[in-house]
Amino acid sequence: MLKLRLMTSAQALVVIGALLLTSCGGGEGEATPTLSPDEIQTHAIGTFSAALTQTARAAPSNTPVPTLTPAPTFPPLATSTGGTPFVSGPTVAPTAGCYGLAFMSDVTIPDNTAMTPGQTFTKTWKVKNNGSCPWGAGYVLAYAGYADQMSGQFVAFTEVIQPGQEVEVSVQFAAPDQAGEYLSAWQMRNPAGVTFPEIIFVKILVQ
């Protein structure tokens, strides 16, 4: 009977152990999902990208901050102070005040006087020295450089012309050989070669 009881007890222990094993592992739990190779690769790439993003945010940036280059500084433009304005071309001495001539009248050969080809004549003007400097030796009427010179030759002064004084000035001409209308322009010039701004002229008709 003892042996039977022992066998029964042993069997009971086996049965109890089987029951315990069944209760611990025999039941069906949640099965671990099985991933395909593509899903494993996608999951790994996402995890790696997230890690890189977190590392970039945590690490200091090595990109240098751009440095602004200051704009160049230029000196201020010069302003007029009332001095002599710039004029291109050769520099001449100022004539304002000292040199001035005013036309008063035609003494001989009024405008559009008829001439024969080659005819010589003397044109005389009455002018006034309206500057502050006297006219003396070396002051001449000079061809102004346009129209026709008509071989003009100035008749020299015989006296000094004071400021405010009126005087007759003359030039000897020769009419051109061809028929037509001719004009010759002249200016007063001092011994230094400075010409007055005023111009006087003669105008003839060759018939």
Image (spheres, grey):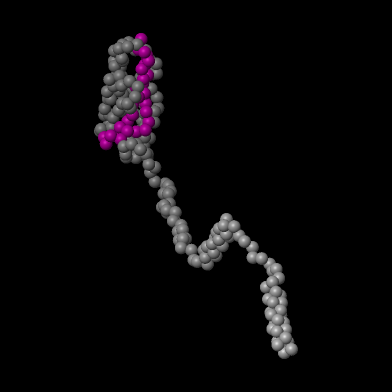
**Which quarter of the figure has residue 67?**
bottom left
Q: Give residue 158's position: percent from left, percent from top.
A: 26, 29
Magenta stretch, overall SS: strand
Q: Quadrant of the N terminus?
A: bottom right
Residue 199 visible in the displayed image: yes
Viewer can see residue 161? no
Which stretch did the figure color magenta?
Answer: 180-207
- Give whichever of 163, 110 is nearer the camera: 110
Considering depth in this image, is 113 or 76 the residue closer to the camera?
76
Look at 37% across and 33% down and name the residue there: 197
Q: Is residue 200 magenta?
A: yes
Left or right of residue 82: residue 8: right
Q: Is residue 63 above or below residue 135?
A: below
Residue 200, image quadrant: top left
**Residue 119: image x %, image y %?**
30, 13
Is 146 placed above or below 90 here? above
Q: Quadrant of the C terminus?
A: top left
Residue 56 in the image, given as x and y percentages of width and height = 52, 63
Q: Residue at x 66, y 65 (%)?
A: 31
In the displayed structure, does residue 35 sit left or right of residue 149?
right
Q: Position of residue 99 (x, y in %)?
A: 34, 36
